[in-house]
Structure formats: C-alpha cells, structure tokens
Amino acid sequence: MERHFEKDINELKERLLWMGSLAERAVHQSVHAVLESDEQLANRVLAEEDAINELQMEVDDRVVQLLALHQLMAVDLRFVLAVSRINNDLERIGDQAVNIAQGALRVLRHPRVKPYVDLPRMSELTEEMVRSALNAVVRRDVELAQKVLASDDQVDHYRDQIFRELLTYMMGDSSVVFPAFELILVAKNLERIGDHATNIAEDVIYLVQGQDIRHNTVDRR
Amino acid sequence: MHATVRPALSVNLPPIVTNAAARETFAGLTMRMTVSKVNFFYGSKQTLFDVSMGIATNKVTSLIGPSGCGKSTLLRTLNRMHETVRHARLEGEILLDGQNILAQDVTAYRRRVGMVFQRPNPFPKSIFDNVAYGLRINGSKLPLAEAVEKSLRHAALWDEVKDHLQKSAYELSGGQQQRLCIARALAVEPEVLLLDEPCSALDPISTAKIEELLVQLKDLCTIAIVTHNMQQAARVSDFTAFLLIGQLIEFNPTPQLFTTPADPRTEAYITGRFG
C-alpha cells in the first residue's frame, strides 16, 4: 500500500540530489578555474554558492517535518537521518569549492609556479569520489560506497606530494611563495572534499545496512 | 566511470523554499465552516469556553487534546448532534458557507455535514442497501447502482465488495465496516465529513487504509477529525486544533504545531509530558 508520506520522501531525495548536482558542478568548475586560470569560471562558482546554502536549509527543514509528522521506521528513518548528514557534507563540499574558486582568483594574478601534474590527477580523483558517492546514494550501492572509501588514502597521498613539491619550490624561490601557498591550500581543500565524499559513502552504508562504520578502519577495506 | 542519474541542471526545478510554512501554499484557502465564540453547556456545566476557529475547505482539520478536553463535544456541534442531548446548550455562532447552521432544517443540514463515529455502525442491511439508504430518501442524480458504486469507490471499498453487494454489512471486517460507513456518508455528497475517532476500534492496517483514504477524500469534501492519537493527527491533517479543558489553546497548520508549537501547553502535550 502506498503511503502519502512517500511523496514527501521522494521530494526530499530529489532536493538532495539537486544539491549534489550543484556541489559536483561547483567542485568541477572551481578546480578548472585553477588549472585553466579561468576567472569567469571562478566567479560562476562564487555566484552559485547561495543556491547550495539555501537548499541545505530547505532539506533540513523537510527532514524535521518528515520526522515530526510521520513516525518513520527502519529504512525510512535511516534514509532521512542519512539525508540530514549528507546534506551537511554537500554544503561543506560547496564551501570548499568556493575556497578553491577564491584561491583560483588569487593564483591567476601570478605566473604559473610549475606545470600542473598532480593537481589535475588529484582533482579528477576527488571529483570521481564525489560523483560515485552521490551515485551510491541514488542506487543505494554499498559496493560503490566502499570504492569511495578506498580512494581516500590516494587523495591524502596526492595532498602530501603536492605540499612537499611546492615547499621545495618556495624554498628555492621566494617570489613564488604566494601562489605556491595558494596551491597548497587548493590541495588541502580538495583533500577535505574527498573526506566529505567518504562521509557520504559511510552514510550510504548506514542507510542500506544499518551499520555505522564511521571511525572504524577495519570495515572500510 | 559510472553514469550519473541526477536532475539535469538545465531543467526547471521548483524554487528553493527554506521554510515548511512557506512551502505550503495557502493561496486561495477558504474556511468552509467557522466557529465563533462558542460556549457549550451540559446543563449548568460548561464544557467549551469561547472557542473560535475555522474548518478549511478541502483540507483535513484535526482536533486533539486529552480526554475530556471537549474535542468530541466541539465536533458534534458542527453537525448539531448536541441537539439530541437533553439540557445541552450552545452559545455562539457556527457558520457553514457563511450561513448560520442553526437557522437551517436539521435533517437537510445533516446531509450537508455527515458524521462517522468511533464504532462502525452499519445498518442491519446489505452492503448495497447501507449505501443506498440515504440516496433513496434524498434522491440521487445518478442511477442508484451507479451512485452506490461511486461511493464505495470513493471509500476505497469497491474492489473488496463488488461481487458481494447483497451480503450483510455485518459480515465485513471492522475496517471494512468503517469504510462502508464512510461510503454511506459520502453517498449523499456532503460538503463536510466529520469523523469522531474513526480508527480507535481498528487494527493498524485498517487504520492505515482509512488514513490514506482521508488524505484522498479531501479533494471531494472538507474533513474534520477528532483523534486521541496525536501521531494520527500529525500524519493526516493539514490543520490541528489543540484543546484543553474546553479551551482552544492552539490552532495552526499541522507541520508548524508539531515542530514549533506556539503554546508551551501544546508542546507539553505533544511531547507526552502530560495527558
């Protein structure tokens, strides 16, 4: 028997996925603003920040309403709780994308420090993590969620590599300190985006299996 | 790389509305019935004190509150059932479509405002005759069989009884009997349907069926329901009125009342702190 609250649950899912699309796009555009020194792209990311923030508020409001009015149980309850958590991670991903875009605007005022090698690889991996995490939400795919979790170490590795390499450049030439430091921050922002994607993946596992695997490295492999 | 299945960002999506109250479109909301400064007495004992509220058109309004708060008393004034009680006295004004309900013929009025009671009370007749009863007295725009089928469909009972219309209504289960009572009330096309704890005698599945039915029925008529189950009020109603010792404490859209009630007494009741 179809219950009328299912319509509200579906609407909640749609709004969350819309937010996911906006966050995914913001990450993609902000990173490409850095890699291609594209000021217009960076400004577009800044302009779209409000939509993500307002969607976060709407999703939270819908969650409260669903919980108060419908006494959800089992998978429905876990879904709404997972949405509430994923909502926060998506908003933080949006914030990190804004930070990257702001970094792009500062970096493009300086000559390029070095050819970008690891940064595009890191950004591609991070974007893939966000995309896969959201797909895992849509499809309730635990296997895909676990692949996201497994990618986190590689993202951290890229961040460390980029940091070490840019540190060397800064030590060798003080004129590149400012842009190099900005690029380190971009790598840091990307690493944080990766962390949020893993949080989303953990929430998918909670939603599907009812298991809370946060802070438990054993279950992530 | 996995294909993404997400709303294309170029598609027009509904605007972002951060607040539930703003999401509910009250544009065009009218009050089918209004209750103004109603005071009610059983003899010298006053049981309703200055109650004023509205019953919104094509919405479900629920009346909640602890036992003895006056919610059933209030509901019964809406279709003048109190007139069957000796020494019952109503002061104040109740309007249906702007007209004083006391100024109308009571039998004709009760066709416009139907009532379903807590215990299913089908007539000792066949399923068909239960629904047809009111139609035979009041007349029907459609042929009788068609009108009966329409009501049974509206009450989500048709598929279960269509091959057994001549069976006695008493052979139906409790939930089916209650839906039959709803079909009987709907047969005369009331403008308002009142339900006094319609599910309290039913099992959870039957309760769920009736709740889903009420959500669909509001397209047909205006609904007011008394329930001691506040979760039911939260699930099915658009507006909720909370009564306490004969007073209307709060009357608000249901999402608002159950998430951020305006009155601390409402909050104490819905959080189970008393009642």
Image (spheres, rainbow, N blue to C red):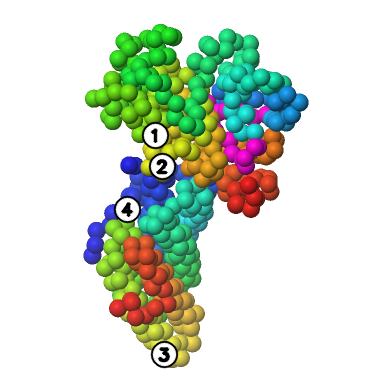
| Location of residue B12 with respect to A81 vertically, above or below | above
Earlier-in-chain disc, 1 versus 2:
1
For mark 4, does the 10 Å Cα neighbourhood hold few (<14), some (14 to 19), or many (20 or more) residues?
Answer: some
On the image, the x and y values in percent for residue B137 come to: 43, 9
Q: Are marks 2 and 4 on the same chain?
A: yes
Mark 1 to mark 3 CA distance (whole Å): 81 Å
For mark 1, does the 10 Å Cα neighbourhood hold few (<14), some (14 to 19), or many (20 or more) residues?
Answer: some
Mark 3 to mark 4 CA distance (whole Å): 42 Å
Q: Secondary structure at mark 2?
A: loop
| Dot 1 amino acid type | Gly
Q: Report which residue position mark 4 lands on.
A: B6
| Location of residue B217 with respect to A29 vertically, above or below | above
Mark 2 to mark 4 CA distance (whole Å): 40 Å
Q: Report which residue position mark 3 lands on.
A: A168
Q: Report which residue position mark 1 lands on.
A: B174
Q: Report which residue position mark 2 lands on.
A: B203
Question: Would you identify the image quadrant in which residue B165 lies?
Answer: top left
The residue located at (70%, 38%) in the rendering is B245
Please report the bounds of the magenta region as a residue range. B52-69
Q: Are marks 1 and 2 in contact (CB under 8 Å)?
A: yes
Q: Quadrant of the N terminus of chain B?
A: bottom left
